[in-house]
Image (tube, rainbow, N blue to C red):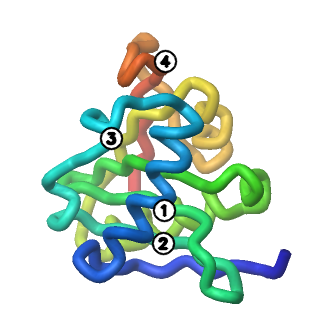
Amino acid sequence: MNGFCVRIVPWDEHAGTLRAIRDRVFIEEQRVPENLERDPRDPSYVHALAETGAGEPIGTGRLLPGGKIGRMAVLPEWRSRRVGSALLEALISVARERGDREIVLDAQVSAEEFYRRQGFSSEGDVFMDAGIPHVRMRLAL
């Protein structure tokens, strides 16, 4: 497999691609109910898309107003290859540019160490979201 690139894309032009990645990771792999994964506010958020050098979609993430990152999803065959880090860096860059002072996210406990390596700190107790244990994490910008 070749390298990859990450770019910020508009939801209205890439909704099908972004949804396909999220469906595969969240609905198929993690068994999140479709009604919990779908968000009618997606068009108003900032979306990052990771693609192979051949233009195949391999990951996504989104940035909400107020500096909250969510829906980070990388296809299984591309995990542990810095795709998640690159998506996160792109979204943090947008947050910095627009003047956000911090990033907050609700990390799946299984991904907590990934976010710690990116400089995030955990806070509070573990909680359940869509049947998956999560922890709130924060990064000052």
Could you say whether the residue bearing mark 3 is in a helix, strand or loop?
helix
- For the point 49% across and 18% down, which residue is it? 133
Could you say whether the residue bearing mark 1 is in a helix, strand or loop?
strand
Q: Do the residues labelled 3 and 1 touch (CB within 8 Å)?
A: no
- For the point 32% across and 41% down, which residue is it? 37
Residue that numbered label 4 is attached to: 133
Q: Nearer the viewer, mark 3 or mark 1?
A: 3
Could you say whether the residue bearing mark 2 is in a helix, strand or loop?
strand
User: Crowding near pointer 4: few (<14 within 10 Å), some, many (20+)?
Assistant: some
- For the point 43% across and 70% down, which residue is it? 17
Along the line of sight, which residue is nearer the eye, 55 or 129? 55
Q: In which quarter of the image is residue 5?
A: bottom right
Q: How far across and down, in percent of the image, does residue 122 sit?
A: 49, 27
Vertically, is 14 above or below 34? below
Tell me: 141 left or right of 98.
Answer: right
Residue that numbered label 3 is attached to: 37
Along the line of sight, which residue is nearer the eye, 123 or 52? 52
Tag shown at residue 60 = 1
Residue that numbered label 2 is attached to: 49
Which of pointers 3 and 4 lies earlier in the amino acid sequence?
3
Distance from Cα at disc 3 to Cα at disc 2: 17 Å
Q: Quadrant of residue 51?
A: bottom right
Tell me: 99 left or right of 74.
Answer: left
Three-letter amino acid code at the position of disc 4? Pro
Which of pointers 3 and 1 lies earlier in the amino acid sequence?
3
